[in-house]
């Protein structure tokens, strides 16, 4: 343990070098300022107090005393020669130290990472039927800040397949305690049937987006689950699902009256099968009911009936329509052709507005029998009797 050695060193250096200790749990902002990520961390504030150095020596009282005396000697010699730096910051340093206006944060909706807390964690993650990777972080943690852009990129690439969440463990102390979080960042994997902390697995993989994505997709293959193909019900949902450099794959399915619930489910199974065949590539799948989005169909030359598939790149403003059988293998082949450049794509000027619709409830269409009283009157006038005689 460092504590007794630290006390011995402090006593020996009394009046020569100041020896102090900081509780980073109580002073998280200070820990963040000096990039403290592991414990114990020892910093030496020598000649330049604004730029401390890390102590890498042995954790014994003698080694600590030797390091302290050496640093004090350097400072004394610098003062004699007149080279010692002033503790007063220069005007340039003062300018740099002035708080800069913070950039306005992006709207929460623009992030692919789901923000988790004590209240929503169980509802969103546990028993969700989805595969989750959850990062437990602290706002002051330097490694967490380095991970943030990689985590965001991975979440964007995995959208529609694996969900990525982030939980501030300093604010959500209940969940952090429940999952035994002691260091930051800690990442845990939750399978589609996870229902408690005992079902979570520690993630020990890469901290780059590509490695996170590769790991997540491998786990998805092993664990099953994954998101169902979402229905596009408004312009907002289309942009939310398809924004970025991914290719948006939209399936136009027959009206529920024509296919019934079973038929629609079968069509969606083919789309989900295609999604599995092209996992790891930048495709995001969705669907609309044929006839509901006439502007979309007109803009992308979808006039040959349903089911149909169109692939749209919002980033490049290009599209391609599949002209093949509607099955998993054919859809995947079509998309592989787009990815390799073998499939022709065409430009479009502007993405048409999406008509807002009520999401499908998973059931068959309600068909109501309408009795027209006028028909009975006409039959009676013709002497053919009314509905009572039928």
Image (cartoon, rainbow, N blue to C red):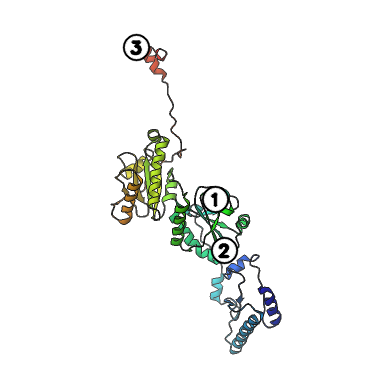
Q: How crowded is mark 1: few (under 14 residues within 10 Å), some or many (20 or more)?
A: many
**Left-right relation of 174 to 228:** right
Q: Which of marks 1 and 3 is nearer the N terminus?
A: 1
Quarter of the figure with the C terminus: top left
Give the Cα separation between the discs numbered 1 and 2. Answer: 22 Å
Give the Cα separation between the discs numbered 1 and 3. Answer: 70 Å
Residue located at (66% from left, 80% from top):
61
Quarter of the figure with the N terminus: bottom right
Residue located at (42% from left, 23% from top):
370
Above or below 82: residue 350: above
Residue 320 is tagged as none
Residue 137 appears at what percent x and percent y?
56, 60
Q: In which quarter of the image is residue 371?
A: top left
Q: In which quarter of the image is residue 38?
A: bottom right
Give the Cα separation between the discs numbered 3 and 2. Answer: 86 Å
Residue tagged 2: 184
Q: Nearer the viewer, mark 1 or mark 3?
A: 1
Residue 382 is tagged as 3
Residue 15 appears at what percent x and percent y?
70, 82
Q: Nearer the viewer, mark 1 or mark 2?
A: 1
Query: Nearest the camera: 365 or 269?
Result: 269
Q: What element carries label 3?
A: loop
Residue tagged 1: 194
């Amino acid at each position: 343990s460092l504590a007794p050695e630290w006390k011995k060193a402090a006593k020996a250096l009394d009046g020569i070098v100041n020896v102090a200790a900081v509780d980073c749990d109580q002073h998280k902002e200070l820990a963040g300022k000096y990039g403290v990520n592991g414990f114990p961390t020892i910093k030496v504030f020598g000649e330049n107090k604004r730029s401390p150095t890390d102590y890498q020596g042995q954790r014994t009282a003698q080694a600590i005393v030797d390091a302290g005396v050496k640093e004090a000697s350097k400072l004394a010699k610098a003062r004699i020669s007149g080279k010692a730096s002033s503790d007063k910051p220069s005007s340039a340093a003062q300018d740099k130290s002035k708080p800069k206006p913070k950039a306005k944060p992006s709207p929460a909706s623009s992030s692919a990472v789901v923000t988790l807390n004590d209240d929503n964690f169980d509802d969103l993650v546990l028993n969700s039927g989805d595969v989750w990777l959850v990062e437990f972080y602290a706002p002051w943690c330097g490694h967490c800040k380095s991970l943030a852009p990689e985590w965001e990129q991975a979440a964007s690439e995995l959208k529609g397949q694996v969900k990525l969440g982030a939980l501030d463990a300093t604010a959500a102390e209940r969940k952090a305690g429940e999952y035994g979080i002691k260091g930051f960042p800690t990442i845990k994997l939750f399978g589609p049937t996870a229902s408690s902390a005992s079902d979570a697995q520690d993630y020990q993989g890469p901290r780059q987006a590509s490695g996170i994505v590769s790991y997540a997709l491998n786990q998805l293959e092993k664990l099953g689950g994954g998101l169902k193909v979402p229905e596009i019900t408004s312009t907002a949902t289309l942009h939310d699902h398809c924004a970025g450099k991914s290719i948006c794959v939209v399936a136009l399915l027959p009206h529920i009256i024509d296919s019934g619930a079973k038929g629609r489910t079968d069509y969606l199974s083919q789309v989900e099968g295609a999604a599995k065949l092209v996992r790891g590539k930048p495709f995001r799948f969705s669907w609309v009911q044929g006839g509901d989005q006439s502007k979309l169909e007109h803009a992308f030359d979808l006039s040959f009936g349903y089911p149909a598939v169109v692939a749209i790149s919002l980033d490049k403003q290009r599209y391609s329509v599949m002209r093949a059988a509607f099955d998993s293998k054919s859809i995947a082949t079509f998309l592989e052709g787009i990815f390799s450049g073998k499939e022709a794509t065409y430009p479009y000027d502007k993405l048409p507005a999406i008509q807002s619709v009520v999401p499908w409830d998973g059931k068959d269409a309600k068909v109501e029998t309408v009795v027209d009283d006028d028909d009975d009157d006409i039959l009676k006038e013709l002497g053919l009797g009314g509905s009572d005689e039928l």
